Image: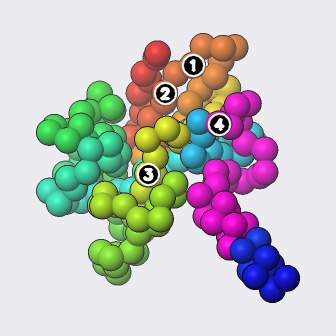
Amino acid sequence: MKKIFSVLILLILKSSLLAQVIFGDAIGTASDKTSVLMEFANLGNRGLILPYVTDKTAITTPGSIILDASTPTAAKVKYYTGTTWVDLSVQPSNVSSYLTIQPVAKENTGAKTVIGSNTSTADGILVLESETKAMVLPITSSYQNIINPAPGTMTLINNGGIKTLAVYNGEQWSFWGF
């Protein structure tokens, strides 16, 4: 009986370690959860704030998305393809004042949270590791519903079925339809 109980506990722990993560509530926005690794509450009017990076030279992991503040007066949201950085902002932004409110402590370079796997060789603070599942961005009906967005805010706009990726660089929104 003791062995059966121990095995049952291990199975429950293993399944919860590799389970989907929903931030904000237990419902999320995806109607079909089979291909979702991480998603956000269906509360609307929110976005995901990307990390502000002042030196991107050490970032070598394809799929990394950042607010590139290497030049604080010309910051842009970018993602890394593995060979080049792709600009998602179109226009630059001055985020100098935002950098002054960031903590002065350096990050622990060994700190990492991995969702979807027990380990990952990818370099990052939050790593989503899956070959079959994806992250669902926070969804809102209008970027204008996000009050006082921070630089690096990213959201998916669903306006009556028309979906658009929106990124905010600190001064203006850029939109990417699909």
Instruction: Give the foreground label among 2 and 3.
Output: 3
Q: Is residue 128 left or right of residue 35?
A: left
Give the Cα distance between marks 4 and 3. 15 Å
Q: Quadrant of residue 47?
A: top right
For the residue labelled by badge 3, is the local secondary structure a helix, a strand or a loop? loop
* Residue position marked by numbered label 4 in the rendering: 34
- Tell me which numbered mark, 4 or 1, is placed earlier along the sequence: 4
At which x and y percent is residue 27? 78, 44
Q: Is residue 21 above or below residue 168?
A: below
* Residue position marked by numbered label 1 in the rendering: 163
- Tell me which numbered mark, 4 or 2, is placed earlier along the sequence: 4
* Residue 20 on the magenta span: yes
Residue 33 seen in this snapshot: yes
- Tell me which numbered mark, 3 or 1, is placed earlier along the sequence: 3
Q: Is residue 104 left or right of residue 60?
A: right
- Tell me which numbered mark, 2 or 3, is placed earlier along the sequence: 3
* Residue position marked by numbered label 2 in the rendering: 165
- The span picked out in magenta is 9-34
For the residue labelled by badge 1, is the local secondary structure a helix, a strand or a loop? strand
Q: Amino acid at mark 3?
A: Glu
Viewer-closest of 3 and 159: 3
Residue drawn at x 53%, y 47% as measured from the top left: 48
Give the Cα distance between marks 4 and 2. 22 Å
At which x and y percent is residue 67? 34, 48
Labels 1 & 2 near each other (Cβ < 8 A): yes
* Residue 11 on the magenta span: yes
Give the Cα distance between marks 3 and 1. 25 Å
Near mark 3 (Cα within 10 A), the count class, few <14, some 14-19 or many ≥20, is some
At which x and y percent is residue 41? 71, 45
Viewer-closest of 52 and 71: 52
Q: Which mark is residue 129?
A: 3
